[in-house]
Image (spheres, rainbow, N blue to C red):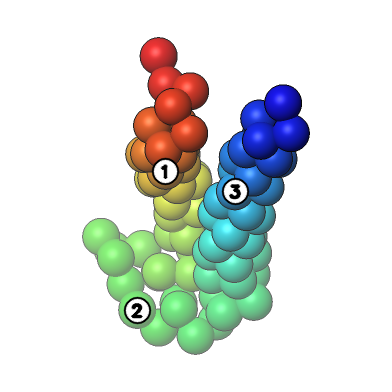
Amino acid sequence: MQDQKQLRRLYWRTNVKYLIILLSIWFLVSYGAGILWADQLNKIRLGGFKLGFWFAQQGSIYFFVILIYVYVILMNRLDRKFDVHD
């Protein structure tokens, strides 16, 4: 019984760690690239648009979708590791 409780706690702790890391990356990309470093990034053009503008308008959304896929992959691995997969 105690082992199950510890396994659940470890599973949840790992899940929260993944969330914190991935959401921190998204924050850095969306806030950093779209606001803080926009002036420096605007010197670079992507598809005719300034890179800072692109990150503020579209890039952070694309990055978030990629991070969702990364989260799914990580959680599938974690589920198999703890034998809680479908």
Disc on the earlier residue, 2 or 1: 2
Give the residue displayed 49% in from the left and 85% down from the top. 40
Label annotation for residue 51: none
Disc on the earlier residue, 3 or 1: 3
- Residue tagged by mark 3? 14
Extreme residue in the top direction: 86
Which amino acid does the dot numbered 1 rest on?
Answer: Leu
Give the x, y percent position of residue 30.
Answer: 58, 59
CA distance separating discs 3 and 2: 38 Å
Label annotation for residue 44: 2
Give the x, y percent position of residue 74.
Answer: 42, 43
Give the residue displayed 57% in from the left and 79% down from the top. 37
Mark 1 secondary-structure assignment:
helix
- Residue tagged by mark 1? 74
Give the x, y percent position of residue 77.
Answer: 38, 39
Q: Residues within 10 Å of mark 1 (few under 14, many from 20)?
A: some
Which amino acid does the dot numbered 3 rest on?
Answer: Thr
Disc on the earlier residue, 3 or 2: 3
Q: Is residue 64 left or right of residue 17?
A: left
Residue 45 showing in the rendered view: yes
Which amino acid does the dot numbered 2 rest on?
Answer: Ile
Report the number of numbered marks: 3
Residue 12 showing in the rendered view: no
Q: Residues within 10 Å of mark 2 (few under 14, many from 20)?
A: few
Give the residue displayed 40% in from the left and 14% down from the top. 86
Give the residue displayed 48% in from the left and 34% down from the top. 82
Q: Is residue 19 left or right of residue 85?
A: right
